[in-house]
Image (cartoon, rainbow, N blue to C red):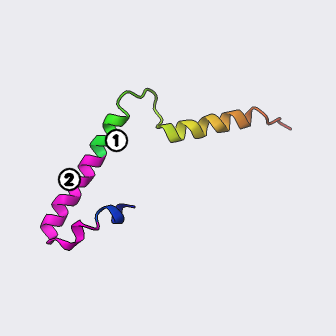
Amino acid sequence: MFNAKIVNYKTKPVLTMAKEVRCYIMRTMTTRKVKFAGRTGSLCPVQASRLEKELIESNKLTPT
């Protein structure tokens, strides 16, 4: 996925490519930080939903 996003940068000189890849990564990190800024809890949504699913399944188990 990452290589598909930076395919346009690969045709440029090395320093320009490095600068543009760094800017792409910074934009991505900022977007994700803003997206999850209002979220409470220590887990991100995917892990929280997986944990919830496991908790529901674990209630069905009986110890032997």
For label 1, count other residues whose C-alpha is less than 10 Å away and answer few (under 14), some (14-19) or many (20+).
few
Q: Position of residue 37 (x, y in %)?
A: 34, 30
Answer above or below: position of 47 versus 3. above
Q: Nearer the viewer, residue 35 or 47?
A: 35
In the rendered structure, the answer to whether residue 50 lies left or right of residue 27 reads: right
Q: Is residue 5 magenta?
A: no
Q: Which residue is mark 1?
A: 32
Observer-nearest of 6 and 14: 6
Q: Earlier in the sequence, mark 1 or mark 2?
A: 2
38, 51: nearer the viewer: 38
Provide residue 18's location: percent of width, then percent of height: 18, 63
Amino acid under disc 1 = Arg
- Circles 1 and 2, Cβ within 8 Å, touching? The answer is no
The quadrant holding residue 22 is bottom left
Report crowding for label 2: few under 14, some 14 to 19, many 20 or more residues within 10 A (C-alpha): few
> Where does label 2 land, which residue?
23
Chain part drawn in magenta? 7-28
